[in-house]
Image (cartoon, rainbow, N blue to C red):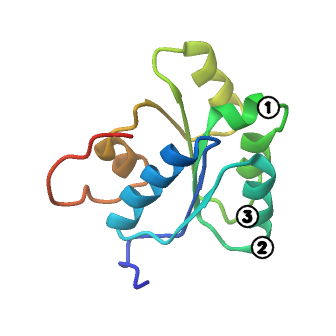
Amino acid sequence: MTMSPISKPVLVADPHAAQAAGLGRRLRRMGHEVCVVTTANDALDRMRREVLNQAVVAVELALNGKPILARLARLPALECLVAIGPGGDVAMERLARCCGAHVYLPRPVATESLAMALRVPVPAGPPDRPP
């Protein structure tokens, strides 16, 4: 895939396969190379094997006893860590930010918010409906 000069490889980690796939599709339309995983172990393994500059991670993975957000935040290549989770849950957002997330986005994740979090232009076309 040819990436635009502003796009960077992105890891999408979400235990819900359909939601992970939907996020992956939207990121690809923005011009990103995307790696989609559904477990914390797979996410950490991919980050060790590949250079991925950005990650979008569901907080549910951090609640399964795996310190995925904190471990990803310590990786030197990671420039942007976006946590996604329930909207209006202040405690969850605080936990995500304390673990190293740069941005917390509530579900359902709007394409415009995702683009702003990853610092890329919003793709042209009809607005997406989050999965």
Residue 128 screen position, x and y as percent: 25, 46
Sequence-wise, which precedes: disc 2 or disc 1? 2
Q: Which mark is residue 49?
A: 2
Mark 3 lies on a secondary structure that is helix
In the figure, residue 49 lies in which quadrant? bottom right
Residue 38 screen position, x and y as percent: 67, 50
Placement of 14 over or under 49, stated as above or below:
above
What residue occupies the far front of the structure in this picture? 18
Q: Nearer the viewer, residue 72 or 59?
A: 59
Q: Are marks 3 and 2 in contact (CB under 8 Å)?
A: yes
Task: Please name the amino acid that badge 1 sits on.
Answer: Asn
Sequence-wise, which precedes: disc 1 or disc 3? 3
In the figure, residue 98 lies in which quadrant? top right
Residue 108 screen position, x and y as percent: 40, 32
How many numbered discs?
Answer: 3
Q: Is residue 30 visible?
A: no
* Quadrant in which the N terminus is drawn: bottom left
Task: Please name the amino acid that badge 2 sits on.
Answer: Arg
Q: Which residue is mark 1?
A: 64
Could you tell me which residue is drawn at 19 percent across and 46 percent down? 127
Could you tell me which residue is drawn at 85 percent across and 31 percent down? 65
Mark 2 lies on a secondary structure that is helix
* Quadrant in which the C terminus is drawn: top left
Q: Estimate how packed mark 3 is, as few (under 14), some (14 to 19) or many (20 or more) residues with alpha carbons within 10 Å.
A: many
